[in-house]
Amino acid sequence: MADPTVLNNQYGLSGKTALVTGGGTGLGKAIATALAQSGARVVIAGRRQEVLEAACAEIGHGAEFMALDLTDIAAIPSAASALHEKFGTFDILINNAGNTLKKPFVESTLQEFDGVFDVHVRGALELSRAIVARMLSEGRQGSVQFISSMTAYIGQPNVSGYTISKTAINGVIRALSAEFAEHGIRVNGVAPGWIDTDVFRTATKGDPERKAKIMGRIPMGKLGTPEDIGWACAFLASPAAKYVTGQVLLVDGGGATGF
């Protein structure tokens, strides 16, 4: 039988404070829940206060929130200062907030691409800069994670802006992991495959051919759950992953590499 003390020491997050962006819904809420269940003090951030309040009630474990709009990049430094003033220094940052653009490439505009890129890349980078700077100033080790996507590994039509943004995120992970490894700050990512969320159900509703193609691509023969992503993030944040940095963990049932 496994020793619960060993498991708690290696996989637990007691005494750690985590910030999850886009934590009010979907994958973000599942990530926040997994971190909270692992013992972390969890703070979720997003644009809609009422959504964040409801999510905190569902997450439990004393989860807290603060409103944050990553599209307002100029305001992120002051928002980060407010987060630090209220919650102290974070040990874990999960850059999960995102949006998408489903549109043929030739019909898309640079402004629309910027709308996706601003959240996934520019906003995440600006927030990470502030959070990591505070970690460095206090000599604190930590875990910074970015939510990538299986679309950074395979081509899918009509989501070029999203795919380009997520591919850029993989480069961010490699660059920052190399820069901060000597300081004990690990930078990793999780790349979800097709996950059973409201977004997936909306995207495939009334399109059985598309859904059949997706399911035929997954060797495990089933969709993932938001909890699968949450526990992957919890592992990467834990002492069990203390020698893991610069990696992107595909959580996709084999979809990116299978046939």
Image: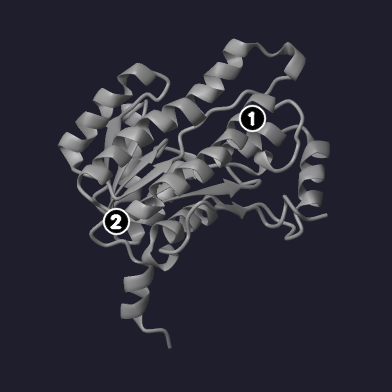
Q: Label 1, label 2: how many angstroms apart (C-alpha)?
A: 32 Å
Image side of residue 244 versus residue 224, left or right: left
On the rendered image, what quadrant is the C terminus found in?
A: bottom right
Q: Position of residue 117 (x, y in %)?
A: 54, 24
Of pointers 1 and 2, the one earlier in the residue sequence: 2
Q: Position of residue 107 (x, y in %)?
A: 73, 12
- Residue 20 in the image: above or below residue 239: above
- Residue 134 in the image: above or below residue 160: below
- Residue 177 in the image: above or below residue 159: below
Secondary structure category for the residue under label 2 = loop
Q: Position of residue 227 (x, y in %)?
A: 50, 54
Residue holding disc 1? 164
Q: Residue at x 33, y 52 (%)?
A: 183
Looking at the image, which residue sits at the far left?
Answer: 85
Secondary structure category for the residue under label 1 = helix
Rate crowding at label 2 as few (under 14), some (14 to 19) or many (20 or more) other CA atoms within 10 Å: many
Q: How many marks?
A: 2
On the rendered image, what quadrant is the N terminus found in?
A: bottom left
Residue holding disc 2? 40
Image side of residue 80 versus residue 151, left or right: left
Image side of residue 196 versus residue 245, left or right: right
